[in-house]
């Protein structure tokens, strides 16, 4: 690769030096010619209109000064016009060289801005046109004195943001100093045709996009030249070609600048320079990191002209995604070769400051002297000042320097050898040797002697006589006759006639007319007109056609066509038509069924006719959508009533098992129950239990988002024994018709929004045992209870009940527990209720009212088990926290402290204790599963109620924890564990004081693998390599102190419980090498303290990783060897503490977001290990910042033994996790 000195235009650098003197706050060197060494005051602006007005004022003032100067004959020796290439050199000296006078020409127009931040939204037609030559627009980032108020500014922002194009540069020698531009969606700056000498110094160009054209930040139009970028930063810019900078037959120099995360859809992720010699692009002492070319080449720089690597450049992780190959240098289209920079992809060093001779590795933080600057370079860097010389060189150097020097005057003598790049103005005398390229302008006079050999590249203008040899490159304008051979590369403008054969790849835009032959691959956009031949593969429509096809489809469509096809389909379609015959037409069937419903339920004919009623919706579903297609003589009533319950409680919005629920983690997706309104028996619907006669005996829902009233039709389920609709949003009143359910034993409607009174009709239910109505908005008194003779358990707390406590409540001799606190009750507890307390020979164990507060208590009670104040500070748990003693508890007694010693045995008979255990545990576990033989919940309940030697009371503080731990044992097939089962005879390995699981003589905190805190709450369950199988029960969320759940190398199946998200203390979830299915539940995002998520090698784990984006404390994530799909969300970059992200061997695809790449440790972040399927010739994930790329190898259960072996060291989790 040729190494050249960077070409820096003299005129541009003259003005640049003046601008930087102000920008950097450097006082010019004292000399006889200096007349003013202080910087002018800065201008404060607050809006885009302020800026344009200030520019207008400066331009007008400059024009007036020039007119005045010219009118008195000043600068008679000036050589240029207002649009000249250069400004007279004499104007920078104190004496007019032509006249010897001190009359000085006007200074170049200067707008010095105080720090500002303004917005300019709009489109590409809204850019400000700069039409005056020599204009300097400089922002004093160090702060300065506002000329309007005389105050010193302190801000360091000099930013123009917004969607519009901001500047159109139409004149020569315009200089920008310290102006930052971001957010344009129409290209930030355009340097127009043949404009010369534009300079950008210390500017940042961020997030500028030009999707359908070239040059996301800067576009150098046709023939623009001598553009200079120094100490600039380009990041996150995007365009069709040239994500940051594009040039068309232009010359430009990039020096001491940084480009990272820029992207082009085509060529040149960072820079795109089109045009052959002599259009030269030079780059020196600059950094190119993580730039990309999506569907082209040259991720850092692409050029088909004469690119020059002038030394000191560094590049790393610039990737051409089409070929998945890096090009850490310049892609020269002429040779189709990537000329790699000498300094590329060393191990990056995070350096906060410069050092002498700082090398290319110092690309994060400040750069050392002579080494350029790094990401986020500040223009006030002393290193750049060292590269600016205010003195002329004494004599020319024989060998060019690697970095161009900046001189305010030309050298006195020609150099001994020609410069590689031509000077912008012609030299006064001919050089001894021919230049490698022609000068940009004609000299005023011919050379004294002809050159000894022709120039290597053609001149831009035709010569008077034809050359004897053809030129090496074509002329800019087309010739009058066509060339004999095709051009090597396509023209930018389409040809007038179509080509004879199709191209290998589609064009980006459709042709105006169809091609004669189909292309080999699909185009990205449809043609304007249909092609004359069919495409190679069919298009896929998601809607049925309006007219039938003339031939059958190979397989049935998912939706019926508007009219039948002429020929039958090859396979049958899915039909909702009946497969049975009720021997009557649809009208007769509907009439008979509606008559039956009206006769057997509380539904009226008006209800069925009302389109908005749940009864109408249920009837319509039963008649026209239900695939069971029941006839009037079938058992239609039960199915209809359950459908009314569904529509009355807004069933389509249920959390689980609605009619359309397809969630992988739904209970209906992993269990035997089905969605509501599903095909098959209603006895299989979620939450519904039927008896031997197939009649509904139980309806049990919890936390399922039922909204609306309980329909009266439920009274037609005459065999109903249990109605449990807890923790919903049910509204309205409690249906009085529930009093007709003679067989019902339990009504549990707590934690809803029910209003009205307790229906007195409930007294008609002779067998009612449990009435749980706490935490509603019920009003009225409690007198309705007095005639429900067999009540055992009543919870009425936290309502709006009023009046006094009836004396007749003392007649309920079977009552075991009643809670009435948190109401507006007054008076006293009747003596008869106190007589029923267990300490007085009765059976009443728990009696809780608002009897706290001494003499100010609302209710006076001398025998209550617990007294509450009128307004408790928080809603109590459904499990009383009183001591498990059955003697009267003293008022204000403190709750018992937890002990690892066995709790005192409960003084209750087994039947009674079992009943209350079930009543208490129904609040924390699936009540349906608890009574289903063979379920893990049923086994855990039976163990706790019948086998546990501790025999703790239902009111014991540890009853829920002990039940959940037993449930965990049975749900994970504990009897099949390799060690520490309940029947184990070998000692458990964790210590002398650890016991086998379900050990009746030990507290659960002493079971092997279990850790507890000082209060006795379970904080950790750690069981690796113990053969756990089965599934993780959702009830594990009741262990609210749980911090670590580590169950590696088992066979645990099923989905991750969504309830894990409620574990607010969970820090580590490690379930790798199991058989989990389903997706990562969205609710896991609520586990905000989670730091380690290790789910790798669960080969059937599916879904996306979006829930992770909310877990801001994550540090270590391993998800490899799963079937996770989708793209990597950009918001994953918000996880600033993340150290390891391993997502290879998955079905994920797309692009690794820049936001994630920014967190790499190589850029000052914490992300050390980033591993994805970014290897191979066709990577699934395009990643320019991954620490390790794997070739994609999809894993199945059949290939589960095949594990990718990385070529680097394995990832190690963070310590202390």
Image: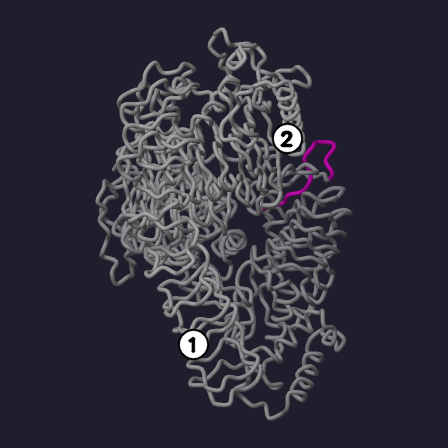
What is the magenta range? Answer: 846-858
Query: Which quarter of the picture shows residue 638?
Result: bottom right
**Camera-side residue: 234 or 1065?**
234
Question: What residue is disc 1 on?
Answer: 534
Q: Percent position (x, y) of residue 494? A: 45, 60
Quadrant (top left/top right/bottom left/bottom right) for the C terminus:
top left
Element under disc 2: helix
Residue identifier under label 2:
51
Residue 1090 x %, y %: 43, 40
Asked whether residue 857 is drawn in magenta, I would say yes
1115 up-or-down from 471: above or below? above
Q: Where does residue 428 sit, x and y in percent of width and height?
A: 39, 25
- In the image, 1100: left or right of 110? left
Residue at 44% from the left image edge and 42% from the top image edge = 247
Query: Is residue 902 on the magenta stretch?
Result: no
Q: Secondary structure at mark 1?
A: loop
Quadrant of the image containing the N terminus: top left
Which of the colour schemes (rainbow, by chain, secondary structure, one colour) is used?
A: one colour
Q: CA distance from mark 1 to mark 2?
A: 57 Å
Residue 1066 shows up from this direction: no
| Residue lying furthest bottom | 583
| Residue at (36% x, 34% y) in the render | 283
């Amino acid at each position: 690769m040729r190494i050249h000195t960077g070409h820096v235009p003299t005129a541009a650098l003259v003005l640049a030096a003046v601008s930087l003197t102000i920008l950097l706050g450097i006082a010019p060197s004292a000399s006889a010619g200096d007349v003013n060494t202080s910087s002018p005051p800065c201008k404060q602006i607050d809006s885009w209109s302020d800026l344009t007005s200030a520019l207008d004022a400066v331009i007008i003032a400059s024009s007036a000064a020039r007119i005045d100067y010219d009118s008195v004959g000043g600068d008679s020796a000036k050589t240029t016009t207002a649009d000249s290439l250069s400004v007279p050199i004499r104007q920078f000296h104190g004496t007019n060289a032509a006249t010897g006078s001190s009359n000085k020409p006007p200074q170049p127009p200067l707008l010095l801005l105080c720090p500002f931040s303004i917005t300019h939204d709009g489109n590409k037609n809204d850019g400000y046109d700069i039409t005056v030559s020599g204009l300097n627009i400089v922002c004093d980032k160090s702060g300065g004195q506002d000329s309007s108020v005389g105050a010193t500014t302190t801000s360091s922002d000099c930013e123009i943001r917004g969607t519009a194009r901001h500047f159109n540069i139409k004149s020569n020698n315009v200089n920008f100093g310290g102006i930052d531009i971001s957010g344009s969606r129409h290209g930030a700056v355009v340097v127009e045709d043949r404009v010369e000498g534009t300079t950008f110094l210390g500017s940042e160009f961020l997030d500028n996009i030009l999707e359908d054209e070239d040059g996301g930040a800067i576009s150098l139009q046709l023939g623009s030249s001598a553009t200079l970028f120094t100490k600039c930063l380009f990041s996150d810019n995007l365009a069709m070609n040239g994500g940051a900078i594009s040039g068309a037959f232009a010359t430009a120099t990039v020096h001491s600048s940084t480009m990272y995360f820029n992207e082009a859809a085509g060529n040149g992720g960072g820079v795109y320079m089109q045009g052959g010699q002599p259009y030269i692009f030079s780059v020196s002492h600059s950094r190119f990191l993580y730039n990309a070319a999506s569907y082209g080449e040259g991720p850092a720089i692409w050029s088909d002209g004469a690119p020059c690597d002038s030394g000191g450049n560094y590049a790393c992780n610039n990737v051409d995604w089409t070929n998945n190959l890096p090009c850490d240098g310049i892609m020269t289209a002429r040779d189709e070769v990537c000329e790699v920079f000498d300094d590329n992809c060393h191990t990056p060093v995070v350096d906060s400051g410069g050092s002498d001779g700082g090398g290319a590795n110092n690309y994060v933080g400040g750069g050392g002297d002579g080494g350029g600057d790094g990401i986020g370079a500040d223009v006030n860097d002393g290193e750049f000042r060292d590269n600016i010389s205010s003195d002329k060189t004494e004599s020319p150097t024989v060998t060019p320097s690697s970095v161009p020097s900046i001189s305010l005057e030309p050298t006195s003598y020609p150099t001994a050898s020609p410069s590689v790049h031509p000077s912008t103005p012609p030299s006064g005398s001919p050089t001894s040797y021919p230049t490698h390229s022609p000068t940009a302008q004609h000299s005023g006079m011919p050379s004294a002697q002809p050159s000894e050999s022709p120039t290597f590249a053609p001149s831009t203008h035709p010569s008077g006589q034809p050359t004897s040899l053809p030129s090496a490159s074509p002329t800019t304008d087309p010739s009058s006759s066509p060339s004999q051979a095709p051009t090597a590369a396509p023209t930018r403008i389409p040809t007038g006639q179509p080509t004879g054969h199709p191209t290998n790849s589609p064009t980006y835009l459709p042709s105006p007319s169809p091609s004669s032959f189909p292309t080999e691959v699909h185009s990205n956009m449809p043609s304007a007109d249909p092609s004359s031949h069919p495409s190679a593969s069919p298009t896929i429509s998601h809607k049925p056609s309006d007219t039938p096809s003339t031939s059958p489809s190979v397989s049935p469509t998912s939706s019926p066509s508007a009219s039948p096809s002429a020929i039958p389909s090859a396979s049958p379609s899915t039909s909702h038509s009946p497969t049975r015959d009720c021997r009557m037409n649809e009208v007769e069937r509907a009439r008979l069924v509606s008559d039956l419903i009206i006769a057997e339920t509380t539904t009226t004919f008006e209800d069925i006719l009302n389109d908005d009623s749940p009864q109408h919706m249920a009837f319509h579903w039963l008649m026209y959508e239900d695939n069971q297609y029941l006839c009037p003589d079938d058992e239609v009533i039960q199915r209809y009533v359950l459908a009314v319950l569904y529509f009355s409680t807004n069933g389509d919005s249920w959390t689980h098992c609605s009619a359309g629920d397809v969630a992988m983690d739904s209970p209906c997706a992993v269990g035997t129950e089905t969605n509501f309104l599903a095909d098959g028996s209603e006895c299989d619907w979620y939450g519904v239990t039927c008896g031997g006669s197939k009649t509904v005996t139980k309806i049990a829902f919890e936390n399922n988002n039922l909204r609306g009233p309980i329909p009266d039709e439920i009274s037609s389920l005459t065999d109903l024994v249990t109605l449990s609709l807890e923790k919903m949003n049910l509204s309205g009143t409690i249906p009085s018709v529930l009093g007709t359910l003679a067989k019902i034993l339990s009504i549990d409607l707590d934690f809803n929004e029910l209003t009205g009174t307790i229906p007195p009709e409930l007294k008609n239910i002779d067998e009612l045992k449990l009435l749980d109505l706490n935490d509603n908005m019920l009003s009225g008194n409690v007198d309705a209870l007095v005639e429900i003779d067999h009540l055992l358990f009543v919870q009425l707390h936290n309502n709006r009940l009023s009046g006094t406590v009836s004396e007749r409540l003392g007649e309920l001799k079977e009552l075991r527990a009643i809670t009435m606190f948190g109401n507006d009750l007054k008076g006293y507890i009747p003596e008869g209720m106190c007589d029923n307390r267990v300490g007085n020979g009765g059976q009443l164990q728990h009696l809780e009212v608002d009897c706290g507060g001494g003499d100010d208590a609302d209710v006076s009670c001398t025998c209550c088990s617990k007294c509450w104040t009128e307004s408790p500070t928080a809603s109590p748990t459904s499990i009383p926290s009183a001591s498990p003693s059955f003697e009267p508890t003293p008022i204000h007694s403190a709750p018992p402290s937890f002990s690892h010693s066995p709790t005192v045995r409960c003084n209750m008979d087994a039947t009674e204790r079992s009943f209350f255990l079930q009543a208490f545990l129904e609040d924390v576990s699936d009540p349906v599963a608890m009574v289903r033989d063979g379920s893990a919940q049923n086994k855990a309940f039976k163990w706790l109620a019948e086998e546990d030697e501790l025999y703790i009371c239902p009111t014991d503080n540890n009853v829920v924890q002990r039940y959940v731990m037993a449930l965990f044992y049975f749900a994970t097939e504990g009897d099949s564990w390799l060690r520490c089962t309940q029947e184990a005879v070998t000692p458990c390995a964790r210590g002398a004081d650890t016991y086998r699981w379900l050990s009746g003589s030990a507290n659960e905190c002493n079971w092997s693998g279990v850790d507890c805190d000082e209060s006795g709450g379970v904080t950790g369950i750690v069981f690796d390599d113990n053969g756990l199988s089965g599934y993780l029960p959702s009830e594990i969320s009741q262990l609210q102190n749980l911090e670590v759940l580590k169950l590696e190398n088992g066979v645990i199946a099923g989905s991750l419980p969504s309830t894990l998200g409620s574990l607010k203390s969970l820090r580590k979830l490690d379930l790798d090498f199991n058989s989990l299915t389903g997706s990562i539940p969205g609710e896991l995002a609520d586990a905000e303290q989670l730091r380690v998520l290790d789910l790798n090698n669960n080969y059937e784990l599916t879904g996306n990783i979006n829930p992770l984006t909310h877990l801001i404390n994550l540090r270590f994530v391993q998800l490899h060897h799963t079937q996770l799909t989708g793209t990597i969300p950009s918001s994953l970059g918000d996880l600033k503490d993340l150290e390891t992200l391993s997502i290879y061997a998955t079905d994920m695809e797309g692009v690794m977001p820049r936001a994630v790449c920014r967190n790499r440790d190589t850029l000052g972040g914490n992300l050390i290990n980033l591993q994805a399927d970014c290897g191979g010739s066709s990577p699934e994930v395009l990643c320019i910042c991954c620490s390790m790329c794997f070739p994609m190898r999809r894993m199945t259960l059949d290939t589960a033994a095949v594990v990718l072996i990385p070529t680097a060291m394995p990832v190690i989790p963070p310590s202390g996790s």
